[in-house]
Each structure stands twice: as structure tokens, then as C-alpha cells.
Amino acid sequence: MSLVGKKAPEFNAAAVVNGNDIVENFSLKQYEGDKYVLFFFYPKDFTFVCPTEIIAFQNKIEEFEKRGVAVVGCSTDSEFSHWAWLNTEKNNGGIKGVKFPIVADISKTISMNYDVLAGEYNYSDEGEAVFEGEPVAYRGLFLIDKEGLVRHSLVNDMPLGRSVDEALRMVDALQHFEENGEVCPANWKEGDDAMDASSVGVAKYLSEH
């Protein structure tokens, strides 16, 4: 199921914000009409690839902020696990210094609604609900515009870390299109030529590149 072009699924859940404060009813709705959102899932706290991604997003947070983008993370761990990880030094496997919100999806409903949960609930022959697969999220990433629509999504398997620079490139591409009405060709980056979405525009672009 692709969410691109659709409203981002809504939720209210506990989250840790500013690296230290637990809030009970965090929602992406607060950004609608004001900011873009880069909402990403990761499998687990206190793991291996996950902290490299989270810290990489934090290291580029000023780049996202100057583009009007709120970065928000999410996993199926509890808010208390998030809090502990956020308050553990990096040299001990922690992510201390990360300030963007991290959402707790203990019920796994957020992951299910974004279609990134690595398993699913089924029923046994006895009628009991059982979970098949891993009860954690894949590395899903969703770029949500100011109207709350998903404009870009990416889902990686557990071992495959994402590129923060590519996430920024997609923000730039979306904003260039919104501001100029030009579409962005393969490997486009800020400062490159874009093109008109017409046969003439494509022909002109291809002849010049």
C-alpha cells in the first residue's frame, strides 16, 4: 500500500521531545499548515544502525529547519525506553544530544497504519491472536507537506540505513516544484536545472544535458 498522494495517517501518542520531556498526546497535526514533516520509523532503541541514522538526522537538523521541516522519529519502543536512550551518552551506545521528537508506538498501530510493521497479527486455530514476524517497524520514511499529504515515501529493510542527504534532496525537489512549477529530473539537486512538465520542456532539457 502506498500512502503517496494521500493524507498521512493521524495519531496521538506519547513522545519524548527536546531530548528529555515526555508528552502524552503528541500529534503531527500540530505542524499542518505551518511546516513540512519528515516522519521516519526505525526498528529499536539501543541497537546498531538506528543510532547512526538518528544522530545523522540531528547533525543536519539546521538544514531541515531552515527549509521549514520538522523531523520526527518513531519506533515501537515505549516513551521510557526512548527517554533512557536519549539520556545515554553516545560512547555508551546512546543518542544524547538528539532534540527532535521521538514517538512511542507501543500499540504498533502507527506502524501498521503507515504499513511499515515487519509482522502482523493473525489468529491461531484456537482463536487466539498471535503476532507473526517481528513486532518492530521497518526503516520507513515519509515526507509530508503542509497540507498533511504524503509526497514521498521510502521503506528499507532492517540492515539498510538511509541517506539523510537524500531526504534533504527530496525536500528541495518538492519545494522547488511548489515554488516554481518545474519538475525535477533524475539526480536533480538544488541549483540544477529543472524542466517544464511538457514534451517541449523534456526535449529541451534532454538536448541541453
Image (cartoon, grey):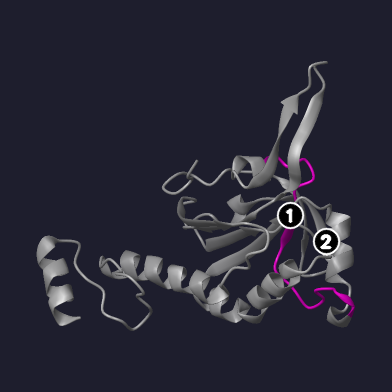
- Residue 17 vs 98, above or below: the answer is above
Specify the label residue 82 is tagged with. Answer: 2
Picture residue at 74% right of the left edge, 36% below the top: 132
Task: Residue 29: give its label.
Answer: none
Inspect the magenta stretch and tell me whether residue 100 lies in it. yes
The residue closer to the viewer here, 117 or 24, is 117
| Residue at image coords 38%, 69% | 173
Q: Position of residue 208 (x, y in %)?
A: 15, 81
Q: Is residue 144 magenta?
A: no
Q: Disc 1 marks which residue?
A: 75
- The answer to whether the residues at label 1 and label 2 have Cβ atoms under 8 Å apart is yes
Position of the C terminus by quadrant: bottom left
Left or right of residue 17: residue 39: left
- Magenta span of residues: 92-109
Percent x, y of residue 149: 46, 50
Few, some or many residues within 10 Å of mark 1 (<14, 14–19, 20+): many
Q: Residue at x 90, y 78 (%)?
A: 92
> How far from the left and from the top, in percent, is residue 95?
80, 74
Q: Residue furthest left?
A: 200
**In front here: 28 or 197?**
197
Density class for disc 2 (Cα within 10 Å; few <14, some 14-19, many ≥20) is many
Amino acid under disc 2: His
